[in-house]
Amino acid sequence: MSEILNVKYNGSPCYNIVFDDSFDGLTGYISELGFENRKIAIITDTNVKPLYADELENIVKAISTRVIIHAIPAGEENKNLHEIEKIYKILIENKFDRHDLIIALGGGVVGDMAGYTAATYLRGIAFIQIPTTLLAQTDSSIGGKTGVDYEGYKNMVGAFYMPSLVYMNIKVLNTLSGEQFASGFAEVMKHGLIKDQDFYMWLIENMYEIEERDPETLIQMIKKSCDIKRQVVEKDPTEKGDRALLNFGHTIGHAIEKYKEFSLSHGECVALGAVAAAYISWKRQMLSMEEYYEIRDMFVPFGLPISVTEIDADEIISLMHSDKKADGKSIKFVLLKKVGKAVLDSTVTDDEARAAIKEITWSDDFE
């Protein structure tokens, strides 16, 4: 069933996104890229390693001179330079050079870390993304953003560095927990909200099939979500303009994520941030009240929160100002003119943000 989307960089073909239902086709793509008879380092984490690392190793060793596997401790708290140094050491000890290959096997944390390693080891070594979560398949594996957190600040150190290939085995989604699946779905919803009203409505219409993880429905959903992100990153590969629209829900979401010490999933925080951004859009009369409440309430059936307990609005605002997305004294927000039409805005005041945070703070009004 292998299908392909090509992603361009500065107008020229750069890499393919492959959609498949197994890992079997991977070796053909690796050979086409010129990495046959080279060393391969599979970078994964301690959650994914027992599920897929051995299977992947057995497949790629047929075309590789040597395959090594390194598992990062799972969890956002391990997305740091200390763990990157461990990968450097392994690559140096195994004499990896610029002609060898890194494979990122895992979710967004693994993809970001393996990509940053690839961008910086020997000033650049090729890498392939094999995303194993819905979040990584529909968002973080596409577009070349790599990086690590620094002292709790998310993705503060990083580089734009394009993969040589993104290879998606849709069947790996069967092993995701409900929370992980919902976390990824928040980014899928985001793509519809910012760029494609028809896709957003399709998601709602296919709610039950999505929740049941119907394979054909998931393929359609993931391909369309990837295509939306592809269009955005092709237009603005290094986030000088429209690519920042992909940060819808992330301004307040990232601050909540840090405030809660990553006890909430990324997708849960994005959903909360999206509700807050939609609330500001309503209060600015960009959305109607009915549109706001429909957007808010549609996160619920997909297992995503619309309120959160025990957060301090002033502390959230302080964290927003310290985020890398802040520009001097102003904070960059993504707001909605309507479903499918997002705009960048740097004029949101602290009072507006505080009201939005109050809106998503749990109360008895939420049923």
Image: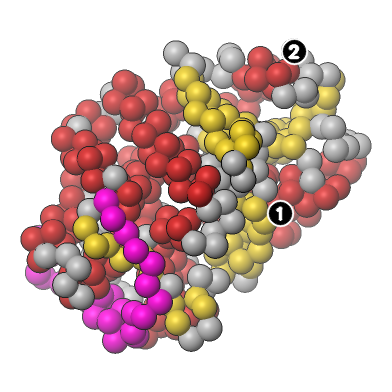
User: Image quadrant of residue 365?
Assistant: bottom left
Report, in whole angstroms, how far the alpha carbon at label 2 lies from the one at label 1. 29 Å
Quarter of the picture containing the C terminus is bottom left
Residue 319 can be seen in this image:
no
Q: Is residue 296 above or below residue 150?
A: above
Residue 83 numbered mark, or none: 1
Left or right: where 132 falls relative to 289: right
The residue carrying pointer 2 sits among few (fewer than 14), some (14 to 19) or many (20 or more) residues within 10 Å by Cα, namely few
Horizontal placement of 210 versus 63: left or right? left
The vertical placement of 158 against 172, above or below, is: below
Please name the residue shown 37% across and 26% down the image.
219
Residue 236, percent from left and from top = 53, 53
What is the quadrant of the N terminus in the image?
Answer: top left
Q: Assign a secondary structure to mark 2.
A: loop
Is residue 131 visible to the viewer in this orientation of the structure? yes
The answer to which image quadrant residue 78 occupies is: bottom right
Q: Where's residue 201, x and y in %? A: 19, 41
Mark 1 is surrounded, within 10 Å at the Cα level, by few (under 14), some (14 to 19) or many (20 or more) other residues, namely some
In the image, 173 versus 293, the foreground residue is 293
User: Who's the residue at 59% across and 15% down the image?
Assistant: 25
User: What segment is highlighted magenta in the picture?
Assistant: 340-367
Whole-percent x and y of residue 37? Answer: 83, 19
Q: Is residue 65 magenta?
A: no
Q: Residue at x 50, y 34 (%)?
A: 132
In the image, residue 278 above or below residue 125: below
Query: What mark, if any, has residue 251 been given in the picture?
Result: none
Q: In the rendered view, would you say 282 is above or below 18?
A: below
Assess whether mark 1 and mark 2 are in contact (beta carbons under 8 angstroms): no
Residue type indicated by callout 2: Ala
Tell me which colouring the rendered structure shows.
Answer: secondary structure
For label 2, the residue is 62
Q: Earlier in the sequence, mark 2 or mark 1?
A: 2
